[in-house]
Image: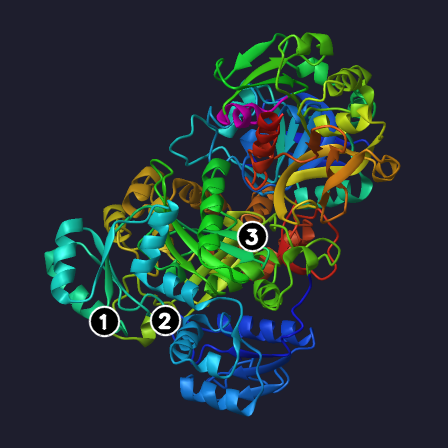
Amino acid sequence: MPNQSKTAILLLADGNIFYGQSFGKTGTTTGEICFNTGMTGYQEVFTDPSYTGQVIIMNNVHIGNYGVKDADVESDSIKIKGLIGRNLEEQFSRIQAKGSLNDYLIANNIIAIEGIDTRALVAHVRTQGAMNCIISTEITDIEKLKYELVQCPNMDGLELSSTISTKTEYELGDKNADLKVAVLDFGVKKNILNCLVERGVHIKVYPAKTPASKLKEFNPDGYFISNGPGDPAAMPYAVETIKEILKENKPFFGICLGHQLLALANGISTFKMHHGHRGLNHPVKNLVTGKCEITTQNHGFGVNPESIKNNNNVEVTHINLNDESIEGIRLKDKPAFSVQYHPEATPGPHDSRYLFDDFVAMMHKN
Amino acid sequence: MPKDNSIKSVLIIGSGPIVIGQACEFDYSGSQAARSLREEGIKVILINSNPATIMTDPMMADKVYLLPLTVESIEQILEENKIDAVLPTMGGQTALNLCKEADELGVWQKYNCRLIGVDVDAINTAEDRDLFRKLMVKIGIKVAPSHVANSFLEGKEFAQEIGFPLVIRASFTLGGSGGGFVHNKEELDAALKHGLEASPIHEVLVEKAVLGWKEYELELLRDKNDNVVIICTVENLDPMGVHTGDSITVAPAMTLSDTAFQDMRNQAILMMRSLGNFAGGCNVQFALNPETEELIAVEINPRVSRSSALASKATGYPIAKIAAKLAIGYSLDELKNQITKTTSAYFEPALDYVIVKVPRWNFDKFKGANDTLGLQMKSVGEVMAIGRSFTEAIQKACQSLENEAVGLGYYGKSLMKSEEIVEYIKTPKWDRIFRIKDALMQGVTVKTIAQATGIDRWFLYQIQSICNVEKQIAEYSLDTLPTEILKHAKKEGFSDLQIAKILQGTCTEEQVYEKRKALGITRVYKMVDTCSAEFEAKTPYFYSTFEN
């Protein structure tokens, strides 16, 4: 109810102000504003490490309806920096749920604002592009908010993976399995690891800055390079590691940030997109099979389509049917491939899980 | 590979007279399909026995036949015209049944006319309960335990085996006619007799009833390359037991987690892919056990339906138009999104609003009719409302019913006591949503109402919030009504008239309007654009709402 809840302010870097009500934790937060068009799976989105540093607008008008549940997470905590919604719901109905969205946000120290005309805001971000923003339930002085906002770093050129990657190595799956995969964690989603383990793979997950020599000690059958937040161009250490790994000619699979890093390791540049792709309905065509797949996406950077034309060793395997952006590549001389989208989904359609089967088959063949 | 150029003329079969259970939705799909084919340079010949339709206007098709929907008429048309293909998926079950009958008599073959948009095996499997059940078992999809009976005695035997409550469904009927629930032995005899008589092949299905489970519908499109997309997910506010046509329905699904939804999506795609390999539209219905999130498949319809007409309006994605293009050989990735004109038709619409459909009944005109809702559709029409919240949308829908209700917020006080209402709402009737609101106004808990009705609590919490606003408003007069409450009430879908009534006649509708106008609380207009504002829309349509 409006007379019971606290007013909150959203200020964009271009000076636009939106007023709403506080939800979740009270306080002040900053981050890069982006929007997600998915109609299910809010908890998975909020816990996806690739959203580190971002304040997210949920386009779907009711968020929180089915509460939260321990199993529906992509990491052990909420990774978004703030949440913007039209109607954020305290009441939920799912019998299996453990608690409400509001309590969950409070427990994770996440500040949210609701009652916002999210459609107008999304249209603004769509035309003006990604920018930083600040949400506050305590500062009402706009000048003060502006001051706080400029302290927020620009996503362009920002390295974030090493801040959220695992600090220690860990293993998952059957240790006697036929296949072993070394996973380089730049902010990996839990379900990516599940998709590998479910296929009978023994995996070992390494911190972001682990050198290639260390990964090789595991003697894996294949390498997996994960998704993650931030600008791939700000990660020369990762590019070096991948160059080293590729020399081994072992099966290699990269997702999202992992895809961008594979491109960089092959001399193809990346770029910051106008406002990115985030949602569960992005159409992708597999150019090898001719089949189409509805994909989950979450990226603000992409692989440069001009730069790829000059590289004879890299083949584009998947394209986006909306804007023809590059969605998948493979190397012609090595068993290495990657996709920009999220085949593990969660949330999202399971159309692309065949890629994990392809990776496993590639390792068996090798 | 674009369109199949060997198809130069297509016969579209209409759905015949408007009856309860099959109304103008098929006029809408038939008209869309005719337009869609003609813009491809294809000659469209149309048959319908109902002249009071848009599709039979002379400008809709190249040639219109106003003839009875019989095999003789089809033969006459095929005799008089060179027709390459027949598209029977736009005219509901009537058209599919006629198409099947003609096929059995070898008519299509005789005139070298291809069937597009569906195949006969798919029609058979979807309509024949036993074939459907066998196919589901084969592909590992759960269905309610059931048996097909062709005689009264057989039916009784199976009923005993499965146990009550049961559903009796008649094969090959429209709008669920001939079907019904059976809670005890006494009801069984009549239900079996009625079902067997209603079925043109004297066949019923005796099925375990999953009363109280949540009901969902998915609208799918598939192209010749087997690419499948889900256009819309519709959640029935009324649980299993009320015909979808008589249920209040909501899009997108409001209470589904991603895990539950993806399970449903995977199963729906598997079902469509196992049902032949035609290119076109399909509707799949599921029941979900709220205790376990276990799913069972209820039915599959390989055609555009009442729900796809709603889904088209709800999402902006013209299902019939695209289904017609897929039937003549296009693949989804070759077609453009009809609203944005720049992005692909191969995608799944994202909504940033809520759609609520409320059926409209006319029991006043059918004196003596049983007004309890069940498997057989009884509504004569429906309203669809769009809002930026469920509360706004359901209020708008209730305001549009053209009955005495002024929204869900005010229509006079209930004369029933709380206990009477709780008893009353156990049986689904046309006015259940209003009585639920009465109960909440009187302080009955959400838990009690959920137990009495099987309606998901989330919807009840939302209706409770409408009640709370109404109670708040009632504490004031127009002069003292705080701006914040007025603004909130408008966002929750309260009409000016509704607010005036709640203020107990101290003001008029116009005065409420003048007051809020002076306060700057005025409508804004939002687009239905298929994509939640992600892309620029070229040909959207608009709805009004209130924002901060």
Badge 2: chain ID = B
- Residue at 71%, 49% in the rendered image: A321
Circle 3 residue: B228
Give the foreground label among 1 and 2.
1
Residue B362 numbered tag: 2
First in sequence: mark 3 or mark 1?
1
Please state the horizontal and vertical placement of residue A120, each as a whole percent of the image.
71, 45
Q: Tell me where residue A282 sits by quadrant.
A: top right
Secondary structure of the residue carrying numbered label 1: loop
In the image, residue A195 lies in the stretch drawn in magenta: yes
Numbered disc 3: secondary structure: strand
Where is A50 relative to B140, above or below? above
Name the residue type under label 2: Asn
In this view of the protein, can residue A195 be seen by the observer? yes
Residue at coordinates 49% horizontally, 32% vertically from top-left? A90
Chain ID at mark 3: B
Q: Residue type at mark 3? A: Val
Task: Answer with left or right where residue A196 lies relative to residue B342.
Answer: left
Magenta region = A188-199
Residue type of the residue flagged with mark 1: His
Q: Is residue A28 left or right of residue B446?
A: right
Q: Position of residue B126 (x, y in %)?
A: 38, 61
